[in-house]
Amino acid sequence: MQHRYRLTHDPVRCRYAFDLSDGKAVIDYEPRDERTVMLVHTGVPPRHEGQGIASELTEAVLTDLEARGMKIVPCCRFIASYIRRHPRWERILAEK
């Protein structure tokens, strides 16, 4: 999938982001262990809401995490809802 924005990852801040022209769309996470992260927050500046940016960011983050062999716990409601709508991502859910 081609993305409109370039995904950046800041492991010190535990944050993925798209740099928008006037802000950042972000997904914050917390490491649970060396192979699992809890995705805790998705945010898009109000001016950019409703343009599909959060979905595009979520897809890019899940793709990156899967490529790195990571599992996820979707604590953020948006991400949990995204996975329900795109069940192919259930493959990277951490065991309960």
Image (tube, rainbow, N blue to C red):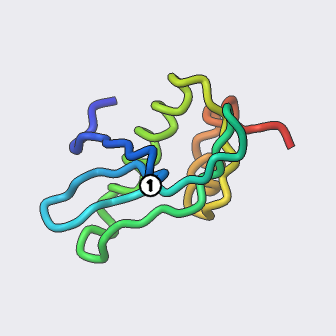
Q: Residue furthest left?
A: 21
State the quadrant of the C terminus.
top right
**Residue at coordinates 46% horizontally, 31% vertically from top-left?**
64
**Count of marks, rendered view:** 1
Say left or right for 65 vs 16: right
State the quadrant of the N terminus.
top left
Residue 26, located in which quarter of the rendered image? bottom left
Residue 17 lies, in percent from the top left, at: 34, 51
Say left or right for 75 vs 27: right
The vertical placement of 83 against 52, above or below, is above
Q: Amino acid at mark 1?
A: Arg
**Residue at coordinates 15% horizontally, 67% vertically from top-left?**
22
Residue 5 lies, in percent from the top left, at: 23, 44
Q: Residue furthest front?
A: 12
Given residues 68 and 93, the one toward you in this image is 68
Say left or right for 57 vs 34: left
The vertical placement of 75 against 46, above or below, is above
**Residue at coordinates 64% horizontally, 44% vertically from top-left?**
37
**Residue at coordinates 41% horizontally, 38% vertically from top-left?**
60
Q: Residue furthest bottom?
A: 46
Residue 72 lies, in percent from the top left, at: 66, 41
- The residue indicated by pointer 1 is 13
The vertical placement of 27 against 22, above or below, is above
Residue 73 lies, in percent from the top left, at: 70, 48
Q: Secondary structure at mark 1?
A: loop
Q: Residue furthest right?
A: 96
Given residues 49 and 20, the one toward you in this image is 20
Q: Residues within 10 Å of mark 1 (few under 14, many from 20)?
A: few
